[in-house]
Amino acid sequence: MDFGFKISPSSAVNLDNVDLTLYNRLLEAEPDICKCIACGSCTASCPANRFSGMSVRKAILNLQRGKEKETARMLSNCMLCGKCTMVCPRGINTRHLILSICKLYKEEAK
Amino acid sequence: MKENILIIGGGIAGLEAAGQLLKLGYNPIIVEKSDHLGGHVADWNRLFPDMSPAEDLVSRLIAASSEANIFLNTEISFVNRLKDSWNIMLSNGISIITRILLFATGFTLFDASKKEEYGYGVYNQVMTNSDLEHWFNTGQDERIPEEGPAAMGFVHCVGSRDEKARNPQCSKVCCITAVKQAIEMKQKFPEAMIYCFYMDLRMFGKKYEDFYISAQKDYGIRFIRGRVSEVSENIEGKLVVKAEDTLSGKPVKVTLDLLVLMSGIVCNQQTCKTAGLLSLPIDSDGFLKSRDNIADITEAPREGIFYAGTCTGPKTVPETLAEARSAALEIHNYILNGM
Ligand SMILES: Cc1cc2nc3c(=O)[nH]c(=O)nc-3n(C[C@H](O)[C@H](O)[C@H](O)COP(=O)(O)OP(=O)(O)OC[C@H]3O[C@@H](n4cnc5c(N)ncnc54)[C@H](O)[C@@H]3O)c2cc1C
Ligand code: SF4
Ligand code: SF4
Ligand code: SF4
């Protein structure tokens, strides 16, 4: 039936239900990922950001909040130029991280 | 005759100053309102940044000041100004004539029950930073389940940076205390999921940032940037905590077994009363007002009156001790040169 409106799904994140299986597997390969301080240097330096909204900061945060699909979608915009790695103050090898995420998700998709 | 110096407060500031003044050949007299020395630090367990036992520090300071006259369970009743000194009447009936007074009256922990939305004193699983230190020392607190909490959280800035709570200032030590306590809980309960809800992480001191990195990397503590907006209880008696994850711009909700409120450092109301007896001014943040907040933090605007430690604002232990030594030296100079 059409009521003329629809209920949109809540955007709230319920931390109780976040499935971190994949994130925890990623942590084994990239233990530095949890050192991110959300400073945004990576985003600001990213040449793809202006056109596609690419942001390593957001990619990491989405993984931590269980929003893997959003991360996967975002990573397809990365050109692997490595600028973000140069600026990260916590020394996270973000370029390598991006590759690890892609690898893990590809395996998952199989 | 040795010069009398009256020290109000037997916390670490008062004890350290007394020890130094003894070495300089004076007669310090400590007036402490509670039944023990060491102040707040006597209630703590291990101190950042080296995780050294608080008990060791307090007993070392007590030993170094044991020659001082110490009155426990005593306060100042009233003060009479004489020509160039004061006649101080204590609550135990003793009166002391002195030219020099040192305030080492410390701070009060913010009363967390005033922030009703956090449920302190309402829900069984909500405690303060101070309660948690007490539990580290005694192992006794019904709010902490024996098997440990499956999930727990720390709320930063409780009663600090809060104009409505009438404390706009930052308490300075609670960010690092939260991270320290989160690590300690994870050491005790490795399976626990631990969250810190913060607005900014103010890790200003020596090695504090290392604590933060270690909390993230070695202990997997989860940091969520956002002030907790409300705490409620579900039918199973667990806490439901709501905040905005301001990094993603989305509201977050989580169910916890234990919540620790990082109560802030606020001015000691009683100090203000004692300061009133001597017509000393109070600064805009509610703490005692120094002659100058840059060059003369340990001196009152009034001759012969000195300050040390958290009576002038939030401070760490090493800062408090350094100030106590500095105040002792100022007092020494004042006696030698009359300035
Ligand atoms: C939860 C928590 C954990 C902390 N952990 C650390 C840590 O690990 N490392 C660190 O460096 N710092 C830590 N701090 C900071 C530390 O507690 C302070 O730096 C320290 O207590 C300051 O000492 P103080 O002597 O100035 O004041 P206080 O400790 O408050 O002592 C003041 C004394 O004066 C007495 N007094 C007050 N008014 C009167 C009066 N009118 N008459 C007589 N006596 C009076 C009081 O009873 C008390 O004994 C922590 C703070 C908090 C809140
Ligand atoms: S490697 Fe990818 S994410 Fe990093 S700056 Fe280059 S395009 Fe942006
Ligand atoms: S630059 Fe590094 S620390 Fe900063 S947001 Fe990006 S990944 Fe995180
Ligand atoms: S030290 Fe941290 S928790 Fe404490 S008031 Fe300042 S910002 Fe808030």
Image: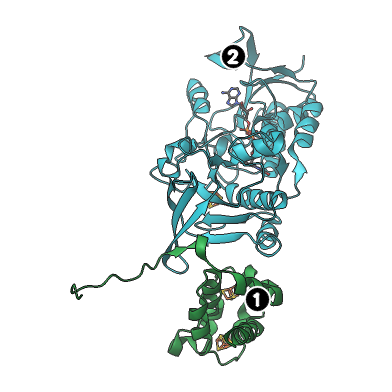
**Whole-percent x, y for residue A65 in the image:** 52, 69
Q: Disc 1 marks which residue? A: A26
- Under mark 1, the amino acid is Leu
Front residue of this view, candidates B234 and B133? B234
Front residue of this view, candidates B4 and A77? A77
Q: CA distance from mark 1 to mark 2?
A: 67 Å
- Under mark 2, the amino acid is Ile
Q: Is residue A72 visible?
A: yes
Q: Quadrant of residue B59?
A: top right
Q: In the figure, is residue B251 to the left or right of B295? A: left
Colouring scheme, one of rainbow, by chain, secondary structure, one colour: by chain
Q: Residues within 10 Å of mark 1 (few under 14, many from 20)?
A: some
Q: Label 1 is found on which chain of the structure?
A: A
Queried on whether the Cβ of the residue with tag 1 lies below 8 angstroms from ligand 3, the answer reads no
Q: What residue sits 53% from the left and 33% below the top?
A: B301
Q: What residue sits 70% from the left and 48% below the top?
A: B48
Indicate whether B142 appears above or below B33.
below
Q: What residue sits 47% from the left and 67% below the top?
A: B247
Chain letter, green: A
The quarter in which the C terminus of chain A is drawn is: bottom right
Q: What residue sits 44% from the left and 90% below the top?
A: A51
The quarter in which the N terminus of chain A is drawn is: bottom left
Indicate whether B236 appears above or below B269.
below
Which residue, as the protein is rendered here, is positioned at the far top? B93
Indicate whether B237 appears above or below B16.
below
Answer yes or no: do the residues labelled 1 and 2 have beta carbons within 8 Å? no
Q: Quadrant of residue B108?
A: top right
Q: Disc 2 marks which residue? A: B88
Q: Residues within 10 Å of mark 2 (few under 14, many from 20)?
A: some
Q: Colour of chain B?
A: cyan
